[in-house]
Image (tube, rainbow, N blue to C red):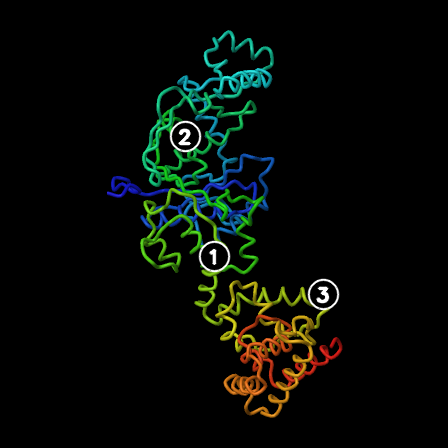
């Protein structure tokens, strides 16, 4: 029997619960994807819940970024809040925590009535003094100063104007659970930091309390989240039990690490999903890569659609060890997906990136013309196989639309040539091309002519071709040289060769 799903469960329900205090990042996106895939794998429900109780840091802009990012990745939720004028979906709302405050208050009052929680009147100074003493004794936990106050003592504190927080009684013993990814986990309650604050003195709830109340009220069956929450799980299990709720199954995903095995963070790494879209990573590749970032398919295959992932996804195949974020592999996957795109769709996706590149170049003083109808489509066969990202399109094809191009004399001269040899090579190449006329200006006609020229003059063909490439494009790396020349056309190729020769003559 699978650990991740029990047939007695009538319906799988799992959720992603981001806080709109920052943009959608790699870690949250992967967690959302795994929840989505698990729900789809078992015909369950994927829920979006916004944890917006951090009023000071939550913003509408961050919420929009998160929602837009999930949409772009194709992770559509079955239940969730009202967004962009569309009504909320699902029978377990509201799906924003700030709209659920009465639920937290009611749950806290119930725990107070049952003496599973109590008001704590400790001042900041008292807590700091206790903390210092406990750290010295290497026992960092709440000392329990208010855990057993009498009614008179509580009334005295109230009369003195002290406003209490509400603490949950953690108790003693061992908290044990079977994690779908990590197996059996057992943690002694003595290391949990003592009785837990669940409501602040202004009655606003804290994370550990809200997440449990919400998961219980929304009938969440599986909590799939990052490994950094593993130490929180015993607290949450105790709260589930105190509330008389079913304890969901837990699966703690491996951390995402940099290549040096440090934790991926916005301070050291590019983590915002929007940045990857802005650079031209396609949603298919991002989803594909995020799925493989900690999960193994059990086969040699690496290319999966979202539907294929949903058919195969199993939490038991998620690794417990850290997942290394490898940008080169992501770019490779992205290139694979770009090559799979139909021509019309690829052109649509490339258009904004090419326009942005052209606008930037015009801003730097270059003269850039707009591509004529059909011109970009004709280029697809020579560029689609070479694009690592959509954002690379400008650098790959801009030489076709810029006149005049800027040629760096230092790049024109191959490493084993000097300026005079390069002038000689470009002059001879230009003459050979001019002699062929328009009829023979095709890639398979140009290459043998220029190879023969190199052989006759005792040059390495690679040196001659590099000089020609820089002369006609201004770049050392482009699509295949002869296809590039054909795309430019005979007259523009001859003009650029002549211009390059002139540039070199000015410095030789």
Q: Which residue is mark 2?
A: 236
Judged by depth in the image, the label closer to the viewer, 2 or 3, is 3
Dot 1: within a 10 Å radius of its alpha carbon, few (fewer than 14), some, or many (20 or more) residues?
some
Q: CA distance from mark 1 to mark 3?
A: 31 Å
Task: Say which quadrant the C terminus sits in.
Answer: bottom right
- Image quarter of residue 11: top left
- Image quarter of residue 278: bottom right
* Residue 82, image x, y percentages: 50, 45
Q: Element under label 2?
A: helix
Q: CA distance from mark 1 to mark 2?
A: 35 Å
Report the disc number at residue 29.
Answer: none
Chain-order first, disc 2 or disc 3: 2
Chain-order first, disc 1 or disc 2: 2
For the point 54% across and 43% down, the residue is 265
Q: CA distance from mark 2 to mark 3?
A: 56 Å
* Residue 251, image x, y percentages: 37, 40
Q: Residue furthest top?
A: 152
Q: Which residue is mark 3?
A: 364
Chain-order first, disc 1 or disc 3: 1
User: Is 438 or 447 nearer to us in this picture?
Assistant: 447
Q: Which residue is mark 1?
A: 330
């Amino acid at each position: 029997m699978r650990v991740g799903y029990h047939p007695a469960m009538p319906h799988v329900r799992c959720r992603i619960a981001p806080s709109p205090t920052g943009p959608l990042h790699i870690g949250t996106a992967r967690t959302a994807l795994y929840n989505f895939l698990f729900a789809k794998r078992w015909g369950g429900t994927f829920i979006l819940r916004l944890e917006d109780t951090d009023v000071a840091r939550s913003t509408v802009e961050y919420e929009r970024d998160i929602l837009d990012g999930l949409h772009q990745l194709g992770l559509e939720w079955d239940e969730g809040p009202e967004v962009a004028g569309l009504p909320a979906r699902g029978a377990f709302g509201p799906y924003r925590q700030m709209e659920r405050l009465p639920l937290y208050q009611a749950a806290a009052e119930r725990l107070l009535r049952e003496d599973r929680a109590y008001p704590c009147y400790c001042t900041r100074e008292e807590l700091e003094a206790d903390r210092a003493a406990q750290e010295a004794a290497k026992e960092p936990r709440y000392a329990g100063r208010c855990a057993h106050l009498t009614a008179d003592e509580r009334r005295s504190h109230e009369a003195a104007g002290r406003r209490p927080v509400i603490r949950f009684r953690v108790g003693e013993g061992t908290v044990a659970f079977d994690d779908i990814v990590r197996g059996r986990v057992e943690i002694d309650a003595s290391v949990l930091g003592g009785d837990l604050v669940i409501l602040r003195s202004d009655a606003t709830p804290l994370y550990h309390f809200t997440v449990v109340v919400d998961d219980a009220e929304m009938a969440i069956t599986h909590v799939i989240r990052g490994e950094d929450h593993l130490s929180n799980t015993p607290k949450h299990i105790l709260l589930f039990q105190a509330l008389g709720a079913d304890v969901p199954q837990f699966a703690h995903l491996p951390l995402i690490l940099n290549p040096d095995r440090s934790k991926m963070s916005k301070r050291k790494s590019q983590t915002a999903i929007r940045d990857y879209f802005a650079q031209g990573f396609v949603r298919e590749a991002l989803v594909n890569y995020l799925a493989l970032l900690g999960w193994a398919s059990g086969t040699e295959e690496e290319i999966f659609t979202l539907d294929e992932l949903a058919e195969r996804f199993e939490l038991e195949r998620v690794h417990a060890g850290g997942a290394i974020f490898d940008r080169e592999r992501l770019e490779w996957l992205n290139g694979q997906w770009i090559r799979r795109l139909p021509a019309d769709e690829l052109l649509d996706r490339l258009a904004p990136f090419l326009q942005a590149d052209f606008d930037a170049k015009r801003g730097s003083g270059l003269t850039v013309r707009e591509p004529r109808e059909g011109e970009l489509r004709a280029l697809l066969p020579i560029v689609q196989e070479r694009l690592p990202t959509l954002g690379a399109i400008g650098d790959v094809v801009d030489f076709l639309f810029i006149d005049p191009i800027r040629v760096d004399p230092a790049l024109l001269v191959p490493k084993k040539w000097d300026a005079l040899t390069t002038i000689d090579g470009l002059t001879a190449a230009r003459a050979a091309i001019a002699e062929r006329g328009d009829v023979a200006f095709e890639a398979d006609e140009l290459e043998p002519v220029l190879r023969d020229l190199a052989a006759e003059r005792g040059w390495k063909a690679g040196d001659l071709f590099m000089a020609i490439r820089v002369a006609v494009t201004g770049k050392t790396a482009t699509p295949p040289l002869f296809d590039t020349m054909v795309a430019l056309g005979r007259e523009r190729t001859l003009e650029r060769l002549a211009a390059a020769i002139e540039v070199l003559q000015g410095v030789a």
